[in-house]
Amino acid sequence: MVWRLTLLAIALSAMTLGATTIIDVSSANTVWLGPDDELSFRIPSWNYGLYAVQYGLPVFPTGVSFVLVSAAADSAAQFDVGLQSADGSICETSGEPLRLSPGVISSATYSGEVSILQADFQLSAAISQQIFDGPGAFLTLRNRGPAITLGLPPHSLQQDLSASLSGGPLSVGALNGEVTLRESSSSVVPEPRADVLMMCGGAFLCLLARLLRRLSQ
């Protein structure tokens, strides 16, 4: 019985090693992306739908474009970019990995060189409905290269993305949704769970007491 408890504790502890971590980084100024980490921006479309109804147009946009601005970063960085539904069942990709391109910004809050990531998506009416029918689409950037820091302080990550939704003659600026970081198992340093440690410790003490009783006999 003791050996079974010990093996169970070890198995539960091992299960935590492959876990991923999802963090809300909407208000953060920068984010560190390790290899295979994903940064997701939610893009609500309800405001587009309101205008579309007024003009008698379909309520789901068929064109989506975005521009992500960050402080100057490694131009060799590459990202897989996808536009997906909230449940992740439908996803449209940009095709080839995207690279950062250099740019310059001069404003009241920031002046200097920046790095820009941008792309356009053209969706069929059916795919658009599947992607936007819910809390909004998710624009996901997956880091295909070495670790990189993205963000343009003092702006928040939520403010670093500008997106527009279009369909026919209508074009509307998208609202800013939450931003989440999904850390891959390769970049997560697992922390031991307290309940697993207690189980392991209890099983070890039971085993030790049993061995001591045998020795005393």
Image (cartoon, grey):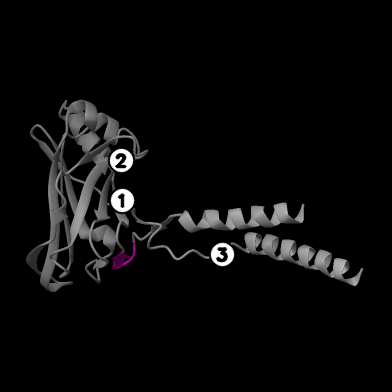
Q: Quadrant of the C terminus?
A: bottom right
Q: Mark 2 or mark 3: which comes first in sequence?
A: 2
Q: Badge 1: few (under 14), some or many (20 or more) residues near its Cα, within 10 Å?
A: some
Label 2 sits on what residue type? Gly
In front: 159, or 97? 97
From the viewer's perspective, tell me whether residue 199 is left or right of residue 55. Answer: right
Element on which disc 2 rests? loop
Q: Measuring from the top left, give residue 163's x and y in whole percent.
A: 18, 49
Which residue occupies 71% across, 52% down? 4
CB under 8 Å between callouts 2 and 1?
yes
Q: Which residue is mark 1?
A: 177
Label 3 sits on what residue type? Pro
Label 1 sits on what residue type? Gly
Residues at marks 2 and 1, CA–CA distance in whole angstroms: 9 Å
Residues at marks 1 and 3, CA–CA distance in whole angstroms: 33 Å
CB under 8 Å between callouts 1 and 3?
no
CB under 8 Å between callouts 2 and 3?
no
- Which residues fall within the magenta stretch? 27-33
Badge nearest the viewer, 2 or 3 = 3
- Please determine whether, in this image, residue 26 is positioned above or below residue 95: below
Element on which disc 1 rests? loop
Q: Which residue is mark 3?
A: 192
Element on which disc 3 rests? loop
In front: 122, or 37? 37
Q: Which residue is mark 2?
A: 136
